Amino acid sequence: MIILPLESELEEYLKKRHLTAKYKKQKRLFEQNVSHPSLNVELLEPAHLHFYSFRVDRKYRATFIFISKNIVEVIDINNHYQ
């Protein structure tokens, strides 16, 4: 599995919240094993839109879409509890 490079706004979001290292760790896990338990990958509602997310840490999640069978693009990173 491959995650495309992040947009500059998302990189800034990670930097401001000191999440860059955590994101890189989770990205490596995702690329090696999408089903890794610490990622907690889930299909978001409404399901027909095919948006998914994985955990960056306990508070933040990365929302992504499948570009092709083995390529995903992270489209947002946000506070899971807001």
Image (cartoon, helix red, strand yellow):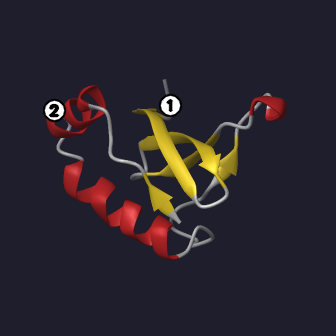
Mark 1 nearby-residue class (10 Å; few <14, some 14–19, many ≥20):
few
Q: Which mark is residue 81?
A: 1
Task: Work out whether 14 lies above or below 9.
Answer: below
Mark 2 nearby-residue class (10 Å; few <14, some 14–19, many ≥20):
few
The residue that appears at 39% across and 62% down in the rendered structure is 26
Looking at the image, residue 8 sits to the left or right of residue 53; the answer is left
The residue that appears at 81% across and 35% down in the rendered structure is 47
- Separation of marks 1 and 2 at Cα, in angstroms: 18 Å
Question: Of the residues shown, which amino acid type is indicated by label 1?
Answer: Tyr
Task: Work out whether 71 lies above or below 11.
Answer: below
What is the residue that sits farthest to the front in this orientation?
68
The residue that appears at 59% across and 59% down in the rendered structure is 40
Say which of marks 1 and 2 sits in front.
Answer: 2
Question: Of the residues shown, which amino acid type is indicated by label 2?
Answer: Lys
On the image, the x and y values in percent for residue 75 come to 47, 33
Task: Work out whether 41 lies above or below 37.
Answer: above
- In the picture of the structure, the residue carrying the numbered disc 2 is 16
Out of 38 and 27, give the one closest to the viewer. 27
On the image, the x and y values in percent for residue 60 come to 41, 41
Q: Which mark is residue 56?
A: none
Secondary element type, mark 2: helix
N-term-proximal mark, 1 vs 2: 2
The residue that appears at 55% across and 55% down in the rendered structure is 71
Q: Is residue 62 visible?
A: no
What is the residue that sits farthest to the right in this orientation?
48
On the image, the x and y values in percent for residue 45 come to 76, 31
Out of 72 and 60, give the one closest to the viewer. 72
Secondary element type, mark 1: loop
